């Protein structure tokens, strides 16, 4: 009987390896998986466990990857965004979004020893791979920020350009290749007025900086783009207006003494705005990922005794860090109903502000081929728009 099993496994293993994946015989104890391919690059394809993840063992992935376990999961899995297993007996899944059980979820053997599984899917900021690039950029921009008091900065600017005989303007190229002024200073202006469209200037410079290269030299490329833009714009400004002929007689570089002054005035403002815009974008990405549902899908039978819990998290981008805030702990336990045709599920929600319990009976036929959707502290069944358990039902009852 061994040969037919090996024959079935061979094409599965070949398919995983073709997808730049990893095949593991069994997980016993602690296993940290950070293997590389023939080119020395991290493997990001599926991880196939031919047997089981044994009780008390840990499978830790260096990069988010799908995990397929042909046997049972009784240990812990960290960093798998999808998990497919023959059975889920007990343990912890951290980083998983979609869990698919091919055989059954529930009590072990014929006993009422219930399964216990923890979905701790959003407690690790490393899960937010899509936000990581923005976090890296935030860290670089945070180091580059310079405090600047507008009144002092403007006074220094106006003193340094008072000898200019022309309006200092900075231009950007519009969508139709036309020149659009985004910064104007009139020397000897008694009100010290500065016309500045900082957002348009920043967007133009970011586009000019380009996305090539690492975040480490991102700011240097940005500074070069700013300096080039100021230099070219002031050169154009000095060519026109009253006194252009005099300036030409004094030399073509009459604008150069003012480049550094304008640069020093604008750079701190641009870096500060760039940081805030990146932080806002990163927060939107994190909120979107945090709100994404987790799916528990049982393809086989659901045994009568099991329970699982998952924390409801929110995340805040503070500086260049993701700061987690646990909103509540959510627990769902299942046992036999009043008869053999029904199962009873109990949902418990515990937060600092509120705690409550909800109980419902479901027929086994009703639960067949249904997925449980875990989203923002509530429990949905696939195909339903309203939750079967959750805080909003408690609020409606009040």
Image (cartoon, rainbow, N blue to C red):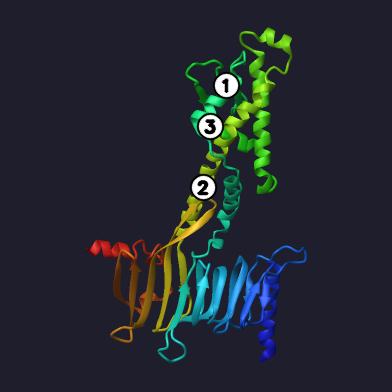
The percent coordinates of residue 276 (x first, y second) are: 51, 43
Q: Tell me the residue at 56%/71% (across/down).
A: 78
Q: Is residue 251 visible to us here?
A: yes
Rate crowding at label 2 as few (under 14), some (14 to 19) or many (20 or more) other CA atoms within 10 Å: many
Q: Tell me the residue at 50%/79% (across/down).
A: 91
Q: Quadrant of residue 249?
A: top right
Rate crowding at label 3 as few (under 14), some (14 to 19) or many (20 or more) other CA atoms within 10 Å: some
Q: Secondary structure at mark 3?
A: helix
Residue at which label 2 appears: 279
Q: Are marks 2 and 3 in contact (CB under 8 Å)?
A: no
Q: Of circles 1 and 2, which is in front? A: 1
Residue at which label 1 appears: 159
Rate crowding at label 1 as few (under 14), some (14 to 19) or many (20 or more) other CA atoms within 10 Å: few
Q: Is residue 388 visible to us here?
A: no
Which mark is on residue 198? 3
In depth, the one of 235 and 151 nearer the eye is: 151
């Amino acid at each position: 009987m061994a040969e037919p099993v090996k024959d079935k496994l061979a094409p599965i293993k070949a398919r995983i390896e073709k997808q730049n994946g990893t095949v593991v015989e069994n997980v016993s104890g602690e296993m940290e998986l950070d293997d590389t391919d023939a080119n020395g690059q991290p493997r990001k394809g599926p991880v196939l466990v031919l047997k089981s993840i044994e009780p008390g063992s840990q499978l830790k992935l260096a990069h988010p990857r799908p995990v397929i376990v042909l046997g049972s999961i009784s240990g812990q899995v960290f960093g798998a965004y999808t998990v497919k297993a023959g059975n889920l007996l007990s343990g912890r899944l951290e980083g998983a979004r979609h869990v698919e059980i091919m055989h059954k979820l529930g009590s072990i053997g014929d006993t009422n020893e219930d399964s216990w599984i923890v979905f701790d899917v959003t407690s690790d900021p490393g899960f937010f791979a899509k936000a990581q690039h923005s976090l890296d950029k935030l860290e670089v921009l945070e180091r580059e920020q310079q405090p600047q008091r507008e009144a002092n900065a403007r006074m220094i600017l106006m003193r340094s350009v008072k000898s200019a005989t022309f309006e200092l303007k900075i231009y950007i190229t519009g969508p139709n290749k036309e020149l659009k002024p985004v910064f104007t200073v009139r020397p000897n202006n008694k009100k010290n007025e500065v016309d500045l469209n900082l957002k348009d200037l920043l967007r133009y410079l970011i586009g000019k900086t380009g996305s090539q290269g690492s975040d480490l030299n991102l700011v240097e490329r940005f500074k070069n783009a700013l300096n080039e833009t100021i230099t070219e714009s002031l050169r154009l400004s000095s060519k026109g207006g009253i006194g252009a002929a005099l300036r030409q007689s004094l030399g073509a570089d009459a604008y150069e003494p003012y480049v550094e002054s304008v640069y020093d005035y604008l750079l701190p403002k641009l870096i500060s705005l760039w940081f805030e815009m990146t932080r806002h974008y990163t927060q939107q990405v994190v909120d979107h990922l945090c709100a994404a549902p987790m799916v528990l899908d049982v393809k086989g039978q659901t045994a009568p005794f099991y329970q699982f819990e998952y924390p409801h998290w929110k995340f805040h981008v503070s500086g260049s860090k993701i700061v987690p805030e646990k909103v509540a702990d959510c627990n769902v336990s299942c046992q036999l109903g009043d008869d053999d045709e029904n199962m009873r599920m109990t949902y418990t929600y515990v937060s600092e502000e509120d705690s409550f319990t909800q109980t419902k009976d479901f027929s086994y036929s009703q639960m067949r081929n249904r997925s449980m959707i875990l989203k923002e502290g509530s429990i949905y069944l696939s195909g339903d728009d309203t939750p079967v358990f959750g805080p909003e039902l408690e609020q409606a009852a009040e």
